[in-house]
Image (cartoon, rainbow, N blue to C red):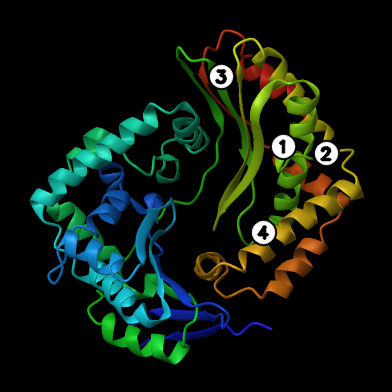
Amino acid sequence: MTRIRETVLPNGLRVLTDPMDTVESVSMGVWVNVGTRHERPEINGVSHLLEHMAFKGTHRRSARDIAEQIEAVGGHLNAYTSREQTAYYAKVLKEDVALGLDIISDILQHSVIDPEELAREQAVVVQEISQAIDTPDDIIFDYFQETAYPDQALGRPVLGTEELVRGMNRDVVHGYMSQNYSASRMILAAAGRVDHDQIVEMAHKAFDTLPAEADLPEEPANYRGGDFREERDLEQVHVLLGFDSVAYDDPDFYAASVYSTVLGGGMSSRLFQEIREKRGLVYSIYSYASSYHDGGMFAVYAGTGENEVAELIPVACEEMLRSTEDVTEEEVRRARAQLKASMLMSLESTSSRCEQLARQIMAFGRPIPVEEVVAKIEAVDAAAVKRTARRILSSRPTVAAIGPLGKVESYDQIASRLAL
């Protein structure tokens, strides 16, 4: 039975805890409901740059103080930016919860955003952008996203561009933080050897200077699909085939997850067995389903040789089409078992439980009991998977490819292979 507790502070900050009596550590963090899709075009990348700058000094701590204080107790501190959220989190021993929470609250409320530190960190982020561009199986996902959601915030890269990042001054970064990092957009989650009332008391004192909520514009997700290709002198062709998919609250959310597992979610999946094991065309191939609060993406990634791609794409398309007709109950049972096992095993980790709790609040507005998730996964049968597969594959495809492209079929050829 779940022991998750929730308290909403007077300023609107939601505090949730998931106690685990058998561990000696606590994972905690603040998830901010602000990400890349909330940025104006001229400041694309500011959410990620701000994430970096939050660690570069506050009125009470220098950047070195932040690093030394958390590591002096054997803890660690990190953050990430996505298209819909930004997260700041720490893991410490149970006796150091107060320190971890104080550091997180400090960097989220009192960051100096020093101009000299900003200039150095802009150079670091530009290096991160350059590294991504030089890594084809990384940057292809940005190109794929932009092609699926062109001319809108949801399609822009999380990192931004070199020109835009270098052009942001302190007023831009600090102003973005002041405007968007309000209590009502934040979730404080903690899992492990934690006392809820203690966390609430600490949070009430620590998060006392958050700004009032301001209007946050957000473009609705408008999936359009299309074709992106970049010829590069590489050993492999990196290919993504994708489609419009479902939002978090869609009735087919769990069926889409099961479908992704059946199609390309493991060594027993259709794509792995047919394309790698039977034909030897790839080292890596997989499918995934990702969701937003108002839409989603379903995609298949593969990396293959210049010659092999001529066979790979038709076979992958054929497997996708077949999955709308002949998925078996045995395949679905195996996929359900994989999803359930992955979820239940993750409950043994304080970090996973903390993040899962925060993400559930962001996506669904409430903690989802494990029993409810299991029941929804178990309710997915072969008929639901085939119906969801047809729904997904009926959308206009998105194709992205990087590498030696001479034997990659045209967009129209690929689209015709995927026509239901």
Dots 3, 2 in contact, CB < 8 A: no
Query: Which one is earlier in the sequence, the residue at label 1 or at label 2?
Result: 2
Residues at discs 1 and 3 in contact (Cβ within 8 Å): no
Q: Is residue 113 above or below residue 90?
A: above
Q: Quadrant of residue 3?
A: bottom right
Instruction: Give how far across and how far down residue 213 sits, in percent.
Output: 30, 72
Q: Are marks 1 and 2 in contact (CB under 8 Å)?
A: yes
Q: Is residue 290 visible?
A: yes
- Residue ID for mark 3: 237
Please tell me which of labels 1 and 4 falls first in the chain.
4
Amino acid type, residue under disc 3 in the picture = Val
Q: Secondary structure at mark 1?
A: helix
Q: CA distance from mark 1 to mark 4?
A: 16 Å
Q: Can the viewer see residue 217 in this picture? A: no
92 or 244: which is nearer to us? Answer: 92
**Left or right: residue 251 compared with residue 381:** left
Which disc number belongs to residue 250?
4
Pick the quarter of the image with the C terminus. Answer: top right
